[in-house]
Image: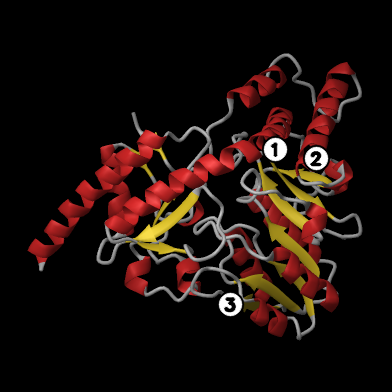
Amino acid sequence: MLAYLDHNATTPLDEKVFEAMLPYFRQHFGNASSRHEYGRNARKAVEEAREQVANAVGAHPSQVIFTSGGTEANNFMLKGASAYLKPSQLVVGSVEHPSVMKPAQELACMGWSLRKIASDGHGLLDLSDAELALQTPTGLVSTMLVNNETGVIQNVSAIAELARKQGAWMHTDAVQALGKINVNFASLNVHAMTLSAHKIYGPKGAAALVVDKRLELKPLISGGGHEKGLRAGTENVSAIVGFGVACELAQKRLAGSSGILFAMREKLENGLAGLGAVIFGQATNRVQNTSYFAFPGIDGETLVMELDRTGYAVASGSACSSGSTEPSSVLMAMQVERDLARGALRVSLGKDTADAQIDGFVVALETVLARLRKLSAIAV
C-alpha cells in the first residue's frame, strides 16, 4: 500500500467530517438562501460551521467569509482591498505561495509598486528588511504564517505591527498553520487571514477569509447577497459543514499530535543526515510535520517518481507549482544554489503517519539514491 507523506498538499477526509457532511448531500439539500424549512436547515448548518471556524482562530463568526479555497481567499483579499485603495506600495514576503505572489504581480501591472521582504538562508523573513520596506508609504502587506514548502513559522505579528504603524492593511495566509500551531486572529494583529479546509482533514472546496469588520473589500464574484454581499454564489453547504467540523477536530487534536510528529520528523531527519541530505530551514522554528531537503546532484522530480514506484508519495515542492520546471521560488529567495534547489523534496507527515513508514521511507530512499548515483556515475 502506498504510504502518503504529502499532507501539506492535501489531507485525507476525516471519517467524522465525512459523516457530518453526508446528510447535506441528500437529506438536507436545501439552498441556504431559501426561506422554507429546507433552506432554513441549510442556513443553520452554515452558521454553525461559521462559528466553529471562528472559534478555531479566536475570531467572531461575523468575521468569517466562506470561499471556495485558499487561493480564492488570497485573491479576494489582495484584489478586493486594492479596489478601495489608491495604488501605492504592496509588500509581500519573498517566500509566498503563488496564490499571493501572482495577484501581487498583477497589481504591479495596475499601478501598484511591488516590494518583496527578503528571506534569510533559513527561510525566515528579515524583519529589518520589512522595516526598511515599510518606510515607504504602503497600502497592503501580505506575509504567510507557515511556509508550505519549508514549514518555517514567520513572525507575522511583528510585521503586522510595522504595517499598522504605516497605516497599511495586513493579511496573512495561515492555510498551512491551522491545525499545526495555535492560530489566533487577534494575537497576530492582522486585518485579514486565509484558512482552508482540505489542509486539516476537511473537504476540498471550502475555505475562508477572516476579516476585520472595518476592512472594505470589493467582491471578486458579484451576483446575489451571499456572505454579506462579499462572495456571491450558492453556498457549498456540505463542504462548509465539513470545514466547521474539521476545525473543531483540529483544535482537539493539536496538543496531542505535535509531540508525536516532532519525534517522527527527528527520526526522519536523522536518517536523511546519514544519507547526505541538505535540510532547508532546519536551524529555525518550523511546524513539526514538515521536512524539506535535497541531495546534491540528484533531481527532485526524478526522486519523487522513483519513490512513488517504491510506495512512497512525497512532493518536490508546492503542489500548486508542480507543473513548473523552474526550481522552487522559495529556495531561490533563500539564496539556495540553483542546482541544489532543483533537487528539493518535501515530506509532510499527518495524523495517521506511522513510525514504521518513516523507517521504510529512509530505507527506500537509500536504495533509490544508490541507483540514481550509480546511473549518474555511468553517464559521466
Q: Give the side of residue 233 with respect to residue 249, left or right.
A: right
Q: Please give the name of the residue rendered at 90% of the width and 19% of the height, measured from the top-left corner.
A: 36
Q: Is residue 266 left or right of residue 155?
A: left
**Nearest the eye: 74 or 120:** 120
Residue 261 versus residue 180: which sits nearer the camera?
261
Residue carrying label 2: 55
* Cα–Cα span, label 2 and label 3: 33 Å
Q: Secondary structure at mark 1?
A: helix
- Residue type (three-letter) at the residue carrying disc 3: Ala
Verify CB contact (< 8 Å) between mark 3 and mark 1.
Answer: no
Reading the image, the residue beneath label 1 is 251
Q: Quadrant of the C terminus?
A: bottom left
Q: Which residue is mark 3?
A: 118
- Secondary structure beneath dot 2 equals helix
In contact (CB < 8 Å): disc 2 and disc 1: yes
Pointer 2 or 1: first along the chain = 2
Residue 306 visible in this rendered orientation of the protein = no
Query: Where does the image place residue 352, in percent across and percent down from the top left?
Result: 49, 32
Between 214 and 253, the residue placed more toward the observer is: 253
Residue 39 at what x, y percent from top left? 85, 23
Mark 2–mark 3 CB contact (< 8 Å): no
Q: Amino acid at mark 1?
A: Gln
> 349 or 27, which is in the foreground?
349
Tell me if I can see residue 297 in this picture. yes
Closer to the eye: label 3 or 1: 1
Neighbourhood count class around disc 3 (C-alpha, 10 Å): few under 14, some 14–19, many 20 upward: many
